[in-house]
Image: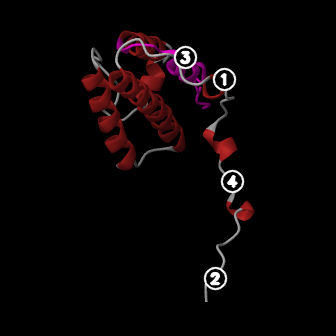
């Protein structure tokens, strides 16, 4: 079973200007998940009520804990990793906004338009990583 990765939401997060924008984007992102995708997640990891920055940060922590304790299939792992990545990015953006005050500008244009690719395509294979030099 192929896992759908929803990249566009990460780009939209970068343009969010206030807490309500981030919360609306989270709701939109969650609405794209199918019931069978949500069912693959470990219990307690699907966000129920996210009404504030505090809720988003708490959810990121819970999903991170579940990810650290995870022992399921590769498909289930991909689902929890996608959710963790998005909620973590939402946490970062909502915290940037809180630190700067409401209605902050979107992130630098270079960052906001950088291409997004699946994580697996960005990670070098073990054979392409050279061992560190010895310091003897």
Q: Earlier in the sequence, mark 3 or mark 2?
A: 3
Q: Which residues are magenta?
A: 1-19
What residue does disc 2 label? 134
What residue does disc 1 label? 113
Q: Is residue 93 magenta?
A: no
Q: Is residue 59 left or right of residue 37?
A: left
Q: Which is more foreground, mark 4 or mark 2?
A: 2
Cα distance between the residues tagged 2 and 1? 39 Å
Q: Given the current orientation, which residue lies at the most extreme right position?
A: 128
**In the depicted structure, whether residue 87 falls above or below residue 23:** below
**In the depicted structure, whether residue 127 falls above or below residue 101:** below
Q: Position of residue 10 (x, y in %)?
A: 54, 24
Q: Earlier in the sequence, mark 1 or mark 3?
A: 3
- Which quadrant, please, contains the C terminus? bottom right
Q: Quadrant of residue 88?
A: top left
Q: Is residue 21 left or right of residue 65?
A: right
Q: Secondary structure at mark 4?
A: loop
Q: Which is more foreground, mark 3 or mark 4?
A: 3
- Which quadrant, please, contains the N terminus? top right
What residue does disc 3 label? 12
> CB under 8 Å between callouts 3 and 2?
no
Q: Which is more foreground, mark 1 or mark 3?
A: 1
What residue does disc 4 label? 124
Which residue sits at x=40%, y=27%?
96
Q: Residues within 10 Å of mark 1 (few under 14, many from 20)?
A: few
């Amino acid at each position: 079973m192929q896992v759908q990765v929803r990249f566009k939401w990460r780009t939209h997060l970068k343009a969010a200007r206030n807490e309500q924008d981030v919360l609306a984007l989270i709701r939109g992102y969650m609405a794209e998940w199918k019931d069978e995708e949500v069912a693959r997640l470990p219990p307690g990891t699907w966000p129920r009520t996210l009404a504030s920055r505090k809720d988003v940060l708490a959810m990121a922590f819970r999903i991170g804990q579940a990810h650290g304790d995870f022992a399921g299939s590769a498909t289930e792992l991909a689902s929890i990793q996608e959710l963790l990545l998005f909620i973590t990015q939402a946490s970062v953006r909502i915290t940037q906004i809180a630190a700067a005050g409401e209605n902050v500008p979107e992130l630098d244009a270079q960052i906001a338009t950088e291409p997004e690719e699946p994580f697996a395509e960005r990670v070098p294979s073990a054979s392409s990583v050279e061992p560190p030099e010895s310091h003897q």
